[in-house]
Image (cartoon, helix red, strand yellow):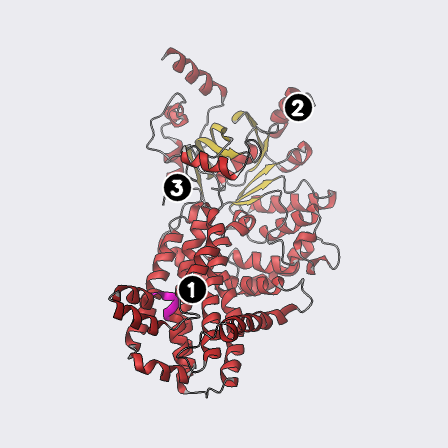
Amino acid sequence: MSHPERLSSPGGEPVGTITDPSQVNGRVGESLAEFAKRHGLTRSAARPPLRAYVQELWQRRTFIWAFASAKTASTYSASRLGQLWQVLTPLLNAAVYYLVFGVLLQTNRGIDNFTAYLITGVFVFTFTQRSLTAGAKSVGNNLSLIRALHFPRASLPFAYVIMELQQLLISMVVLLVIVLATGEMPTLHWLLVVPVLMLQLLFNVGISLAVARAGAFVRDIQQLLPFITRTWLYFSGVFFFIPKMVHRFNEDGHAWVGHILEANPGAVYIELMRTALISSFRQDLVPYDPSYARLWLYAVLWAVVAFIGGFWYFYRAEERYGRG
Amino acid sequence: MAKALKEKIAVSGAQPEVVIDPTREPIVVVDGLHIVYRVYSAGGGKGTAATALLRILRRENRPQMKEVHAVRGVSFIAYRGDAIGVIGTNGSGKSTLLKAIAGLLPPARGAVYTDGQPSLLGVNAALMRDLSGSRNIILGCLAMGLSQEETKKRYDEIVKFADLKPGFIDYPMSTYSSGMGARLRFAIAAARTHDVMLIDEALATGDAKFKRRSKAKIDELRKQAGAVFLVAHNLDVIEETCNRVIWLDEGRIKMDGDPQTVLSAYTEATGK
């Protein structure tokens, strides 16, 4: 990543025609920089050490939660139906996808309960997609707050992902109702929803942090994101049955395509959620000899890599977010 | 070479030298600060997709990019308890200097050293435009690191200080007049003791009553041994509030001293 926002590195540059005032001041015995250092002053807006930064961020957890709730409330305040949209939006989404892929295209080859299958995929992927989109705007849309008050900037991408999580939790209730209505029975597997969501949350926070930094300095990202997320959506097996495709690629001798499809984090979290919620889907998978251990391994690896990588990447530019 | 030398003398002679006062505790040290920033003009050029593509192919910079050398070698020390007024004509680099102290603009050369994180209050009136005043207060306090109990304790004080019209506290901040927005913002920021507070015309839109209260708040802040920087075009405000005035001219310090001297010299020079 280049730093277009940085004009020149401070120091390390030959002093040109302009006198360094610390030299003018030489007769006092110490330069201004030494004087400042002796009194414990630090460079303005320097990035705190990682440990202190994490502590500061943890200390802001109430802010993160309150910010997310307030933003959710204000999003719907102008519409007549208000908070009801939080339930209506996922329902309408599900209806549209069911109409196109279930009724018109009849894509449900090999899947017993296609309605539940499809809607689970849509809801789970929407969480990742919306986290990414919100993350890209999280710094740019809050410059006035960033400039006026001092707080760890990572709070903002965190808050936007929490906002999407609150929305997802409502969608999950809708989803459970749909799953029950389509004839599935509640089983102990449902408990797996919690770890799946936690891992997906970690993953989403990670990618949001990364895209938040990119979006803060290169606004073009926001124009590009819709295309990226849409491509990702089509590759994540929301409408298709990935094990079947993997099987086909294996027979054609392109096994590597199958491996990529299986390792795709979008597909991993969707697949895990489906196996947790839909018992008929677990039956559909049996002929393809599914490896649950590998699926869980991918889920954990993606979550850890994305979270640590994204956090580190965001933190490295902490002192520059209010600029521009 | 001779030309360069001459320039050297001219520039260093133009600005007053910094004398360190060993008896006082510094809080902001600005050391030979130069700020250069780029501006992009929106107009000009044809602005079509084809011209944008040509520009990228030719590896040119964005159109109408200009480099502005806004602050040119400024040095000074602010001590604990200082309230410093920054004056100068439009475009003399006042706001740029404040932004640099807040760490929002990277120095092209030189450095700014501060104790703690400065807080900058600018003219744009809202913190979170789409949220109500009361949400802004709560979120602002939490963002500054106050606990929930502290926030609850300060809430009434902030509302009272901002002195909004009844009912407005529940409206989104985007509906506020600029004066109301500025008052609320100042009230929120002042709820926590900042070591360095930078106020860029943020008090200009307030009425006489608010000016009195904000002066009291600034005095309180000074007593807690922080420092306040105040940019204002209204010289009366500066004279009443500040104990020291810096006069900027074309990015250089023209004068730095007690308010009476600097302000009268400034008034004379600008012919007010």
Please report the bounds of the magenta region as a residue range.
A264-268
Amino acid at pointer 2: Thr
According to the image, label 1 marks what residue? Answer: A234
- Do discs 2 and 1 share a chain? no
Q: Name which quarter of the figure residue A289 lies in.
A: bottom left
Dominant secondary-structure state across the stretch colored magenta:
helix
For label 2, the crowd category at 10 Å Cα-Cα, with few meaning under 14, some 14 to 19 and many 20 or more, is few
x and y, in percent, of residue A215 in the image:
46, 50
Q: Label 2 is found on which chain of the structure?
A: B
- Kind of residue at badge 1: Tyr
Q: Amino acid at mark 3?
A: His
Residue A160 visible in the picture: yes
| Magenta stretch encompasses residue B17 | no
Where's residue A281, x and y in %?
A: 39, 81
**Residue identified by numbered label 3:** A3
Counting from the top left corner in percent of width and height, residue B73 is at 46, 27
Q: Please give the residue where the numbered disc 2 appears in the rendered image.
A: B267
- Horizontal side of A177 relative to A82 (left or right) equals left
How crowded is the residue under tag 1: few (<14 C-alpha within 10 Å), some, or many (20+)?
few
Residue A227 location in percent, x, y?
A: 46, 55
**Label 2 to label 1, Cα distance in Å?**
68 Å
Residue A301 position (above or below residue B208): below
